Image: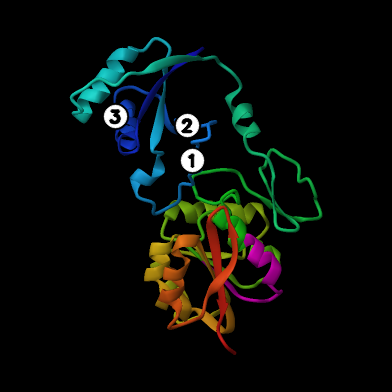
Amino acid sequence: MSWTEIVIEVARDQAEALSDALMQHGALSVSVEDADLGTDAEQPLFGEPGMPPQAAAWERSRVVALTDNHADHAGMVADAVQSLGLGYALPFAMRAVEDQDWVRLTQSQFEPIHIGKRIWVVPSWHEAPEPDALVLELDPGLAFGTGSHPTTRLCMEWLEEYVQAEQSVLDYGCGSGILALVARKLGAQPVIGVDLDVQALEAASFNSERNHCSDIAYYLPESFVLACPAHRYDIVVANILAGPLTEMAAMLSAHVADGGALVLSGVLDSQAEQVCAAYAPYIALEIWAEHEGWVALAGRLPV
């Protein structure tokens, strides 16, 4: 069997709405790409939880809809455009997609990731390049965090350098649980993960079982408050976004034990000063490291 892709170039603010409209009118799947991919104008873009919808596309976006080979492609586009009330036609191109081993093709796009000195994030279909290293077996999925994003890497590198055995660690906004897993494999205990996304907690629990770290406890925020009231940790790490981090300054700081460390990421270098200022009444933060325009902020409470 073969398929046909409908390819439409649109502005950033139209990408999400057009994608939804194409799905409603018969597309099997829709993806959004950088229309300038492979050129000097290509823009790196990392989607993250909490980002506004318009941030999940590029200034010049390419919407690609996968369709059945015998679908009415022109009619599908026309119906999608009409449902959006644009008042004008959108030019589109079509390209054939031949049948192939889609599972093998998808797997080939995800190779083991080397982070820090000795951490490897390895999909389940690969052998660990260094079996004696700190190996995390993680498959790409719906929950954010396989180590590929600069902010995740920064936090993992900090943990690798500073975590000591038997320290307690709180991973707030844990996503797939990758930071909690790194801490636990480095000897931290207890390790707690908190996230407001039930699906993320399910993925984190699954990843913990797979990596023989089933003693990591995961909570929704409200459950965490009940289960661990007023508890303080040797290390609190939060890889979220600058806005939520700023709003949670008092709460996150309150969970840091005397002499303990607070590590924040999900912060652009241009946002570092703003986030540090929000935490200044509680704990002095400074930029620990930077990667691709993102920073990790870190600080310690006095003993």
Q: Answer whether labels 3 and 2 touch (C-beta < 8 Å).
A: no
Q: CA distance from mark 3 to mark 2?
A: 23 Å
Query: Up-down: is 250 above or below 221?
Result: below
The kind of secondary structure element at disc 2 is loop
In the picture, measured across the screen, residue 55 lies left or right of residue 131, that is left
Front position in the image: 242 or 102? 242
| Amino acid type, callout 3 | Ala
Give, as a single range, the part of the protein colored magenta. 156-171
| Amino acid type, callout 2 | Asp
Q: Which mark is residue 36?
A: 2
Q: Which mark is residue 21?
A: 3
In the picture, measured across the screen, residue 151 lies left or right of residue 35, that is right
Q: Position of residue 213 (x, y in %)?
A: 65, 61
Query: Upstream in the sequence, badge 1 or badge 3?
Result: 3
The kind of secondary structure element at disc 3 is helix
Colour scheme employed for the rendering of this structure: rainbow
User: Can residue 226 be seen here?
Assistant: no
